[in-house]
Structure formats: C-alpha cells, structure tokens
Image (cartoon, grey):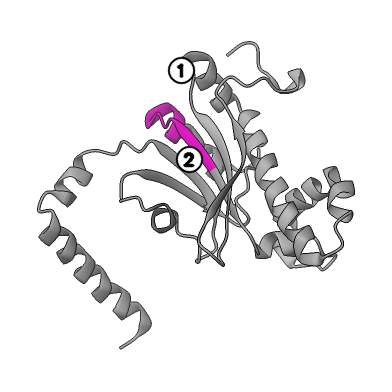
Amino acid sequence: MKAYERLLLENKAWAAEKVLDDPEFFSRLSHLQTPEFLWIGCSDSRVPANEITGTQPGEIFVHRNIANMVVHTDLNLLAVLQYAVDVLKVKHIIVCGHYGCGGVKAALTQHSYGIINKWLRNIKDVYRIHREEIDSLKIDDERVDRLIELNVQEQVMNLAKTSIVQKSWKNNHYPHLHGWVYSIENGIIKSIFEMEAGTHLDPIYEFDDL
C-alpha cells in the first residue's frame, strides 16, 4: 500500500469512529464554525495544534508557517487574521513556537538557504534587537531556545501593531494575545508573553483613526 493510500484509509476509519461516538458530530461541524482561538504556529509536523491542546475540530482556527511568524507584508497571514477577528470574532490569538525550531536555528547562521533567506531575515531582525542578551548565553542550545522565546514575543507584538487587532481592541475589547512555546521533548506548553486587549504600544504604532 502506498503511503498516501494509507492516509485515505485512516481518514475513513477516523470518520466512522467519530460517527459511532457521536452521530451528530459532522452535522454540527458543517453548519457552524465558532472557534474561540486563532492559533499561529510553526509548520513543523511535530506540533499539531489540536493534538497538543486536546481540542476538537471546530475549536481552533489555525494558521501555520515556518517559525510561527507574523510578518506585516504576508497577505496570507493577514487574510487569516482579519477573517478570524472580524468574522469569527475569536477572543484569543495564540502565537505558539517550539523549542528546537529549525527556522530559528537557521536564522542564527550565516548560511544561505535560497528563497527562504527572505523569510528568515525577519527572525534575524529579532536576533539583532536582542543580540546582547542572546550572545551572553554561552551554550548554543540556550541561545537558540532564548531566541525562540523572544521571537514569539516579537510576533505577538507584531499582531498588536496591526490595524485589524487595534480596531477590534477599540470596538470589542478583544482579542487577548498570547505567546507560548511548546517543548517537543516533554509535550508541555510554556506561556512566555501575554498582551491584554487594549495594551498600549509605542505611540508610533498606535492608530488614532480606527
């Protein structure tokens, strides 16, 4: 059996099990989507949002990219963000990185990786801002892990800088923003940064005409 054929068989088995446990499961999903959370995570296959949070289909709206970035020119991310905030009216947005992230490791090198260089440059900018703290750590793994945490923090800040989030803060007093890091080694999520709705930023990033 080919690998992709196994996936199709597993899907049928999963669907049958869901219906056996709850005959109305798919009927409810097909008529309503009301997630409370938007999850912005890494594309790493070892970090599936639903599994590591113990949530069911329909409970988390998910966007994933390399190293869980919030880049202000990324129309894919911005489209997901606007839909989640304006249409789904999510109350929480979670940026979740993970220790041992290959994208962050790559950003700490001077190696050229081709087209991905343009993406990794955003992480290099985070390193440049926090260079003194990161360089003070003597062990390579500690430097990577700290940059992973700081990168998550900066991506949460990038969310807060968007007019999408600020408009919702002004009119609705949500969403709250959360920065988490997941450990692949033990399966535990660590909360490292939070921003309540309405948190003030450097004034240069705040819009006054929303």
* Residue density around tag 2, few if under 14, some if 14–19, many if 20 or more, within 10 Å: some
Magenta stretch: give its range: 84-94
Image quarter in which the C terminus is found = top right
In this view, the mark in front (2 or 1): 1
Residue 159, position in %: x, y?
A: 61, 34
Asked which secondary structure carries label 1, the reply is helix
Q: Which amino acid, mark 2?
A: Val
Q: Residue furthest bottom?
A: 1
Residue 203, position in %: x, y?
A: 75, 18
Residue named by callout 1: 172
Q: Which amino acid, mark 1?
A: Asn
Q: Which of 204 and 194 is in front in this view?
A: 194
Q: Does the magenta stretch include residue 30?
A: no
Image quarter in which the N terminus is found = bottom left
Residue named by callout 2: 80
Q: In this view, does 10 lie to the left or right of 130?
A: left
